[in-house]
Every structure is written in C-alpha cells, then in structure tokens.
Image: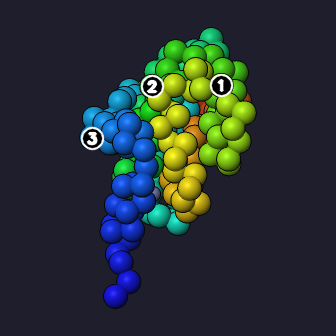
C-alpha cells in the first residue's frame, strides 16, 4: 500500500530539525496577519498545483513602504506557515527591502548557503524544507504571489485592484 500524502508529509516534517518544526507549526496554528485588508493597493492570488495550496496576498503600499499586509489561503502546513512568516518579515519594510528579502529567501530555498541569517530571521526555519524538492514550491508560493502583487503595483495596480473587486 502506498502511503497517503498526509503520511508522506508527516514523515517529511518529522525529519525537520525540532526547533524549525516548532517555528513552522507555531505559524501554521497561529497565523500572523491572516485575513484581508479593507483597501489594499494590490493583491494577488497564487496557486501551487503540485500540492493544491493557494495563498492570496494583499498589500497596502504607501510611499514605497509596505504599511499593511494580509494573507488568506488553504493548503499544507508549509505553504500556510511560510505565508504567515512572510507577512511578519515584510510588514513595515520598503519595497526594495522586500524584493531583496525575496531574493535571499528564494536563493536559500534553491540551496544557496550564502545567506544573511540575521536578516532572514524566522524564515530560516524553512531551510530544512529544501530536502524535499516538491515542498519547496509550497514554501515559495507566498513569495511568488507577493512578487506578482508588487509587479501589479508597478503597473498602476490601484486601478486593477479596484476593478477586480468590482467584478467580484
Ligand atoms: Zn503544499
């Protein structure tokens, strides 16, 4: 009998360092900034077909600073805890700082060890996930969704965001 995906995931998570697993589970059970913003300047919904995770990221960017951030979604513990850690890491940062953190985080998930761990903070907890290539997509989903939301902001997404709400 082949193990179910839940069993497989549980086995993978059991192989993570205890401290890291605690951080991941804490964000999964007590997600930070989960919800939605009353008037985001940009939003994007991302989907990871490999696992079925989805994450919607909303940002309120003013004067080049991410003043507010919120996420919603469903999926595996890695995808949702990564989204929660991301919101905490980017809130209050400038857009270039957020982009640089994106670069650092995705480099770590691709296997780079040339990482400034002081800057990356709790996100380091996801480092162990790179042992499981399929789960790397779970960990990076929120970040790719964030990047798309920022790209839309560049393109004058204020309008796009309100159009999207109007359609809903
Ligand atoms: Zn997943």
Residue 22 position within the rendered picture, expressed as x and y whole percent measured from the top left: 33, 39
Find out if the beta carbon at label 3 lies less than 8 Å from the nearest ligand 1 atom: no
Q: Secondary structure at mark 3?
A: helix
The structure residue drawn at horizontal position 65% and vertical position 25%, both measured from the top left corner, is 116
Task: Tell me the SS state at disc 2.
Answer: helix
Q: Secondary structure at mark 1?
A: loop
Looking at the picture, how far across and down is residue 9, in whole percent? 39, 62
Q: Which is more N-terminal, label 3 or label 2?
A: 3
Q: Residue at x 53, y 34 (%)?
A: 124
* Foreground disc of the pair 1, 2: 1
Res. 79 visible in picture: yes
Question: Would you say the residues marked 1 and 2 are in contact, meaning their CB atoms lie under 8 Å apart?
Answer: no
Which x, y percent locates residue 62? 57, 15
From the viewer's perspective, tell me whether residue 63 is left or right of residue 24. Answer: right
Distance (Cα) linking label 1 and label 2: 17 Å
- Real-space CA distance between mark 2 and mark 3, rounded to the nearest whole angstrom: 15 Å
Q: Nearer the viewer, residue 131 or 41?
A: 131
Q: Position of residue 64 (x, y in %)?
A: 64, 15
Color theme of the render? rainbow
Kindly identify which numbered label has been placed on residue 88.
2
Position of residue 103 in the picture relative to residue 81 (left or right): right
Mark number for residue 80? none
**Marker disc for residue 29:** 3
Q: Which residue is mark 1?
A: 116
Quadrant into which the N terminus falls:
bottom left
Q: Is residue 76 above or below residue 50?
A: above
Q: Residue furthest bottom?
A: 1
Q: Residue at x 42, y 44 (%)?
A: 17
Please tell me which residue lies in front, 147 or 89.
Answer: 89
């Amino acid at each position: 009998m082949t193990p179910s995906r839940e069993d497989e995931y549980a086995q993978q998570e059991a192989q993570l360092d205890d401290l890291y697993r605690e951080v991941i589970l804490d964000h999964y059970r007590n997600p930070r900034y989960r919800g939605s913003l009353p008037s985001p300047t940009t939003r994007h919904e991302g989907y990871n077909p490999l696992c079925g995770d989805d994450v919607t990221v909303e940002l309120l960017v003013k004067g080049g600073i991410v003043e507010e951030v919120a996420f919603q979604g469903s999926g595996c513990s890695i995808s949702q805890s990564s989204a929660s850690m991301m919101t905490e890491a980017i809130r209050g940062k400038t857009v270039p700082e957020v982009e640089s953190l994106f670069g650092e985080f995705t480099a770590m998930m691709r296997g780079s060890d040339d990482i400034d761990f002081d800057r990356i903070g709790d996100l380091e907890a996801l480092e162990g996930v790179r042992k499981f290539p399929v789960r790397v997509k779970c960990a990076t989903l929120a970040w790719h969704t964030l990047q798309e939301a920022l790209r839309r902001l560049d393109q004058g997404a204020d309008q796009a965001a309100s159009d999207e709400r109007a359609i809903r």
